[in-house]
Image (cartoon, grey):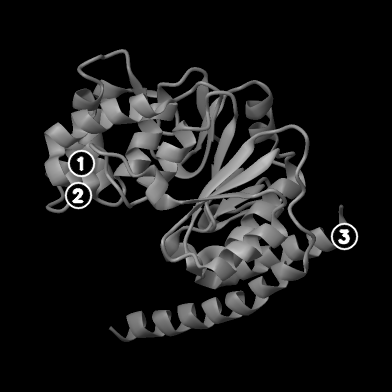
Amino acid sequence: MIKYYLSEIIRRFQKQIFDQLVKKILDKPPVKISTHGPLVLSMVHQRDVLPYLAAVKSFAHHVDISGVIIIADKTISAEDKEIFKTHIPNVIIYNAIEFVRDGMPSGGCWERLIAISNHTASNYVIQLDADTLTTSTPEVVIECISKNISFTLGTFDLISKVNVTEVSRWAQSHCLHNKNPHIQLTCESNLMFAAADDESKVYIRGCAGFTGFAPGSICEEDIRVLSQRMMTKLGDTWSKWGTEQFASNYLISNSEPSRALPHPVYTTPDLINHTTCFVHFIGPLRYKNGKYTHHLNLVLEELNTKS
């Protein structure tokens, strides 16, 4: 118990340091928008307005983008929208409620996935979480964009495409030994149902925090069909937080061509090494050991010295 409280005190202290530092992103030049490149689309909560500016400015510093679309959580205020407009030229802002659909979950980032599907007809769309930083040129991502290859942020669990029958067995074995399995495992244990028993389907156990959808890779009907299948199987469970990531994984995996980004080049803060160019500062690791602050400092310095 003492260890927990001490850890929480340290976490809060590290967060305070980060919160003070991230304000400096307002002093940096606006996001650079090019005449070509993918659209960046993100769903943003009010607490993440400044971290998101750091995420998108650091990404656009290394990758040409043609525009930014923000799906505003209900917490986003008029003042927040003005900040976006000041720092992101020609930003398009939608309210999340505009992407709520009958027969599909709402909340838990589902509006984000539906919005992506509405923009992939003729655009390469990159989903970029607010808790990410691009620390150097992401060569694999640039290659994926140029070749119209969809991607997902890989993890160490099943980072290659694996047949749905194998993933389903793997997930079922984990669920058997866990009284309260994570919702993603629950969904993965029902992969054959998601695939309508099509054994040719595949799955990448990726992360929806950083994903690329090539033009024509998905449409809203794809999401609806998958959602209706899983809702029939899981009922209200399908509306839980985490199901959108499963859906994103499944849809990208079965969009050809597609791939997982390699670890640890694209990684989490616990696995950073000299090859890393992109970091996703996921919840439990976000402020641990001050790495988020350290890498934000490096990003801020780079935004100072390069155009």
The residue drawn where x is 51% and y is 24% is 258
The type of residue carrying mark 3 is: Thr
Mark 2 touching mark 3, by CB under 8 A?
A: no
Q: Amino acid at mark 2?
A: Pro
Q: Residues within 10 Å of mark 3 (few under 14, many from 20)?
A: few
Residue sitting at 43 percent across and 62 percent down? 283
**Which quadrant is the N terminus positioned in?**
bottom left
- Vertical position of residue 270 compared to residue 161: above or below: below
Q: Quadrant of residue 137?
A: top right
Three-letter code for the amino acid on which mark 1 is drawn: Thr
In the image, what residue occupies the spot 53% across and 76% down?
A: 15
**Residue 12 visible in image:** yes
Q: Where is residue 47 shown, x and y percent of the image?
A: 49, 69
Inter-mark Cα distance, 3 to 1: 47 Å
Q: What's the mark number on residue 305?
A: 3
User: How far apart in space, not on screen, are marks 2 and 1 (Cα)?
Assistant: 6 Å
Q: Nearer the viewer, mark 2 or mark 3?
A: 3
Q: Which residue is mark 2?
A: 181
Q: Nearer the viewer, residue 4 or 286?
A: 286
Task: Please report contact status of discs 2 and 1: CB closer than 8 Å, yes or no.
Answer: yes
Query: Can you give x and y, in whole percent of width and height, for residue 157 in the image?
Result: 39, 39
Q: Which residue is mark 1?
A: 186
- The crowd level at tag 1 (other Cα within 10 Å; few <14, some 14-19, many 20+) is many
Q: Is residue 154 above or below residue 197?
A: below
